[in-house]
Image (cartoon, coloured by chain):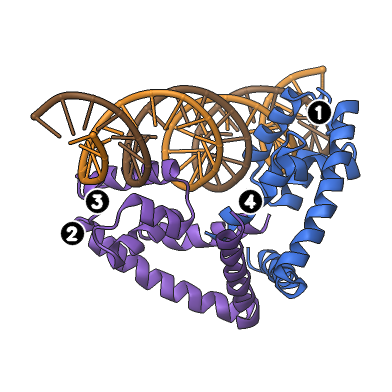
Chain colours: A blue, B purple, C brown, D orange
Amino acid sequence: MLSRMVTGLYNEAFAEAGVTFAQAALLMRIFAQPGIRQVVLSKQVQIEKSALSRDIQLLQRNGWLQPNVRDGLNLTELGTITAKRCHKIWKQLNHDIRAELGSDAVDGLSLLSERLTDLKHKKP
Amino acid sequence: MLSRMVTGLYNEAFAEAGVTFAQAALLMRIFAQPGIRQVVLSKQVQIEKSALSRDIQLLQRNGWLQPNVRDGLNLTELGTITAKRCHKIWKQLNHDIRAELGSDAVDGLSLLSERLTDLKHKKP
DNA sequence: GATCCAAAGTTGCATATGCAACTTGCGTCT
DNA sequence: AGACGCAAGTTGCATATGCAACTTTGGATC
């Protein structure tokens, strides 16, 4: 479906930096919020805590995260470099996508995302 | 991210019929196009052939698909019933979602999807 | 008819994800 | 201090997915 196509595009772009899309998103957020806890992060990215836990372990294995994970997440130097690289790719990618698909379509997605998040906060 | 939320919603709805969102989509398509080949289906739903092959095996294990898969996919009676049930849920769900998120947002998604598909056809 | 090829399908290996059950650790309450 | 409990994290089990390598199969060629 749709998400498969989008994810495919993004993964392709980030492959250059040796990371997947999901990993890139995490790296950038940890970069922006050093010492963040898994619970908080999992809410931000809407990933189940167990899934996140595993993604984190993967980042660790790749040498991007400092070991003592349970007291907050912190990047290694290598991780920091990678995060910065990801951010550059990310900006470029967003730019390209707006160009290719049209700003209106992209904004539509953001709108949808907001409304969904609102729902989540009201309903459950 | 976004797709996680959406997928979550859809899975929740289809859980009632004992199927996941992905499985429901396949069942409905096979219902609409009996005897369809995996290659064709994989293009329609934009799933890699290997992933599809496994999804198909799963449908078989659940007793929804007839065994001789390599000569075209056909539902069993049970599968047909399930597919119909899925279709009902699907219609309901789309209706609800338009109501909750607004038709404009949903239409925006469709637009995006079209443009992406166009891209796929031009580029590669 | 035997051979060989390209397309279809499957399998090995890896990531990403969710739910439910379990573990751990820290703080509270008595 | 000691027992208890909740919140954070982890682990078991399952689906969903992609890429690359392999197998199978139905035809086309000769």
Which chain is mark 3 on? B
Q: Mark 2 lies on which chain?
A: B
Residue at image location 56% in from the left, 79% down from the top: B98
Q: Image point 33% across, 59% down: which residue?
A: B27
Q: Is residue C27 left or right of residue A4?
A: right
Q: What residue type is labelled 2?
A: Glu
Which of the two discs, 2 and 3, labels the residue nearer the N terminus?
3
**Residue type indicated by callout 1:** Trp
**Residue assigned mark 1:** A64
Quarter where residue A86 is shown:
top right
> Which sits earlier in the primary sequence, circle 1 or circle 4?
4
Give coordinates of residue B81: x percent, y percent: 24, 63
For disc 1, the chain is A
Residue B89 is labelled as none
Disc 3, SS:
loop
Q: Tell me where residue A2 sits by quadrant.
A: bottom right
Quick one: SS at disc 4? helix
Q: Is mark 1 on a helix, strand or loop?
A: loop
Residue assigned mark 4: A7
Percent x, y of residue A39? 75, 43
Q: Position of residue A27 (x, y in %)?
A: 80, 39
Q: Which amino acid type is marked by label 3?
A: Leu
Q: Are marks 3 and 1 on the same chain?
A: no
> Which of the two residues, C2 or A98, is positioned nearer the viewer here?
C2
Question: Label 3 to label 4, Cα distance in Å?
Answer: 29 Å
Q: Provide the chain ID for the residue under circle 4.
A: A
Q: Do the residues labelled 3 and 4 touch (CB within 8 Å)?
A: no
Residue C16 to residue A101: above or below: above
Residue behind mark 3: B65
Label 4 or label 2, whichever lies nearer to me, is 4
Q: Mark 2 points at which residue?
A: B77
